[in-house]
Image (spheres, rainbow, N blue to C red):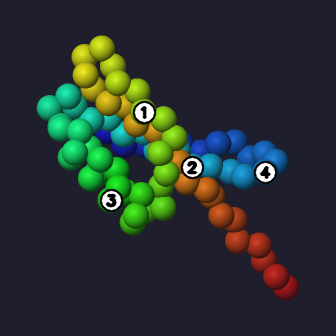
């Protein structure tokens, strides 16, 4: 399950967050490869990893929101 969240506008850097869950059946090496793929091709970086009591990995990824400034 994946869903992107946006931090409310404020001062400084704005981040976009994406939450991904991996079942306990996925080996650590496979999860690593999937996260590296997202980082290389989507510009995401690792924010948080939580491993639940049932073994599921809940990962939060983030990337900067770059706003284009109009010049006229």
Distance between the alpha carbons at the discs numbered 2 and 1: 16 Å
- Horizontal placement of 5 versus 9: left or right? left
Q: Where the N terminus falls, by quadrant?
A: top left
Which class describes the residues within 10 Å of circle 3: few (<14), some (14-19), or many (20+)?
few
- Dot 1: element: strand
Q: Which residue is mark 4?
A: 12
Residue with the mark numbered 1: 49
Q: Which-is-in-front pick, marks 1 and 4?
A: 1
Which label's residue is closer to the chain start, 1 or 3?
3
- Label 1 with label 4: CB-CB less than 8 Å: no
Badges 2 and 1: C-beta atoms under 8 Å apart?
A: no
CA gap between label 4 and label 2 equals 13 Å
Q: In the displayed structure, would residue 6 be above or below residue 37?
A: above
Q: Tell me whether circle 4 and circle 2 mark residues in contact (CB < 8 Å).
A: no
Q: Earlier in the sequence, mark 3 or mark 4?
A: 4
Disc 1 to disc 3, how far (Cα)? 17 Å
Q: Say which label, 1 or 4, has the lower sequence index.
A: 4
Query: What separation in Å lies between label 3 and label 2 (alpha carbons)?
Result: 18 Å
What x and y, as percent, mark residue 34?
28, 51
x and y, in percent, of residue 70 in the image: 78, 77
User: In 3D space, how far apart are the residues under numbered discs 3 and 4 (Cα atoms)?
Assistant: 28 Å
Q: What label does residue 16 carry, if any?
A: 2
């Amino acid at each position: 399950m994946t869903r992107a969240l946006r931090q409310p506008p404020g001062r400084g850097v704005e981040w976009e967050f994406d939450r991904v869950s991996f079942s306990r059946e996925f080996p650590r090496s496979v999860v690593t490869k999937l996260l590296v793929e997202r980082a290389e091709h989507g510009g995401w970086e690792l924010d948080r990893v939580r491993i639940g009591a049932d073994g599921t990995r809940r990962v939060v990824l983030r990337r900067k929101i770059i706003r284009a400034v109009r010049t006229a």
